[in-house]
Image: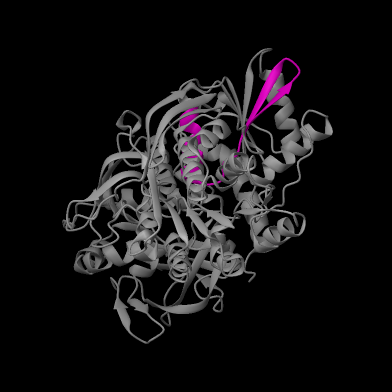
Amino acid sequence: MRIRLAHLYPEYLNIYADRGNIAVLERRAALRGHELAIESIGLGVEIRPTEHDLFYIGGGQDREQALIAPDLVVKSASIRSAIDEGAALLAVCGGYQLLGRGYRGRDGSLMPGVGLFPHETVAGAARMIGDVLLECELEPGQRRTVAGFENHAGQTRLDPGAKALGRVLYGFGNDGESGFEGCRVGRAVGTYLHGPLLPRNPWLADWLIAQALAHATDGTPPAFEELPDDLAVEAHRVAAQRARTRGGRR
Amino acid sequence: MAVHSATNGKTTTTAMAAHILGVEHRLAWNRAGANLLSGIASALLTASDATLGLFEVDEAALSEAITRTRPRVVSLANLFRDQLDRYGELELVAERWREAVRTLPDDTSLVLNGDDPLVANLGEGRSTVIRYGLDDRRHARQSLQHAADSKYCLRCGAAYVYDAAYVGHLGEYRCAACGHARPILDVTARDIDLVGLRASRFLLETPAGHIPVELALPGLYNVYNATSAASLCLALGASPSEISAGLESFRAAFGRFERIPVGSKTVVMLLVKNPAGANEVLRTLEAGVPPVLVIALNDAIADGQDVSWIWDVDFEPLLPHAQHVIASGERAAELGLRLRYGGLAADHLELIANLESALDRGLELTEAGDTLVVLPTYTAMLALRGVLTSRGLVEHYWENPR
């Protein structure tokens, strides 16, 4: 099967090794016999309805994010409708912020976002930097952990009733206060965690691939056979240990 | 007093300048790479008879170092993404540098890398500036590397066009939209000849005349370091012959291309610490991929606790040729994952987290007369050097962890 991935602004948003996430999606799809067809969506490029099964948007430095933000707002409606009709999405760090309702500066002004995730980000006083360990339950009854690294000044506040990606076991998370990290809407997940995220959390990569396949086939997400993931298991173990000993400290 | 700062090459460039200037001057120099204010202060305390102060300064400490030392020459070489968990975003460091330069009296000389848009821009509106760069398109890369920074025009935001990209985003850039471009260079390195893993040769064109350079260090990034050191020395009044002689007799700074004989074999240690630096180190290996390679990734504060940068390093061209790679250090598994996803076959990868064991295994696999190449991050380099020191193979060399 062909999984059509739209990679948003790869030239601008790539600060925390986002290509690692793409490499994992590509390889793990291939090992299950599926091809990940990657299309770069840059400035001024239109997102055509129903043509993508999976979206990826990474993080950039402030300057790069400011360069793409106006263009992203133009794409808002097409991104929201793609997720509405069942496409999957992973947004990391800056991309996660940009897909919310907006970013509120210290002066109270709101820089509008895409409005996909029900959250607003406000400028924070101190950066939240360090290792993070989450507990997630994307499918009922299936609890998994995610180990990553966060580095953000913005505090992201989820709307009441909004679903988080996971509960913070160690680290700061969305705002350093709520005990939650990331956000989920349908098959779309957003998170502050990089590292990059997917190499040491392969179950999440598999979940995204399965969701994208469900969209591509108009069916249900397939169940995959396990892959030999010894290295990922070990990398996850060390990263989780780091979160326990030094996550969430200022 | 002169200060030098950059993301990459600080220690090597300052050591080169010290080697050139040490003939004529008694130096106060923070030779051990202790580049925070405390290191500068202790270098000054131990050199009360010095006639010239020469200091390598951490990027984040530049502003305070300038306020405290009031240097007559400020040399700034490059800004790359580096340890975002420690320094914050590149633009943040750049803004601090802009503020620091704004406070300088007008008679302070600036020595700037014209090939780095963010750095070159610091000279605008100032009277005493030496701008240097490279001019030899045979050594340009086909395209900007994946991890390139500062790709967009400082003035208008359009993507720069590179007529030649040499190291990361350093090169001959221009903006097709607004015309902003690399400034005219005062010191230019041309006719560059790279001699594998061992050496490089080039010609420096300077206002003081042509300076032929023979350098016992490989790679374009060391050509940048030498050009930067030469420009700094010119600003301090050194002559072309002093510069030429100094660079020719210069040997690698601690852990940076250091060659250490171990019995019938040689260990070459090449510090890696961020994508741009690591890419250049790997590029020098591409000419002759070593049969055995030890890569050691630690994640202490001095290494960067965030290890995601290894995914921005272009390991890919090297991996199909690598016979045996040993991934080591506290984050060995993370590194192993990176290499496997980069195309390294499972049976060519060995995971040995313990540094000493990894070094011994590497030496065991290296044939007599061959070279074992070791690529450690900062604290892994200190630890490995500690192992070699305790075996009496290298002299003890104190370096202050950053």
* Range covered by the magenta-colored residues: B257-284
| Coloring applied to the structure | one colour
Residue B217 can be seen, yes or no: yes
Residue B9 spot, x, y in % from top left: 53, 44
Q: Going 59% across and 39% down the picture, which residue do you hit?
A: B20
How many numbered marks appear? 0
Image side of residue A87 versus residue B133, left or right: left
Quarter of the image with the C terminus of chain B in it: bottom right
Front residue (pair B169, B205): B205
Q: Is residue B274 magenta?
A: yes
> Residue most toward the bottom?
A108
Front residue (pair B343, B172): B172
Q: Is residue A227 magenta?
A: no
> Residue most toward the top?
B368
Residue A37 spot, x, y in % from top left: 27, 42
Q: Going 66% across and 53% down the picture, which residue do you hit?
A: B51
Q: Residue B142 sits in which quadrant?
A: top left
Residue B132 spot, x, y in % from top left: 39, 45
Quarter of the image with the N terminus of chain B in it: bottom right
Residue B219 spot, x, y in % from top left: 48, 31
Front residue (pair B203, B309): B203
Q: Residue B254 sits in which quadrant?
A: top right
Q: Going 69% across and 34% down the picture, which residue do you hit?
A: B352
Image side of residue A137 versus residue A22, left or right: right
Q: Residue A232 sits in which quadrant?
A: top right
Image side of residue B253 versus residue A4, left or right: right
Residue A144 can be seen, yes or no: no
Q: Going 77% across and 31% down the picture, which residue do you hit?
A: B394
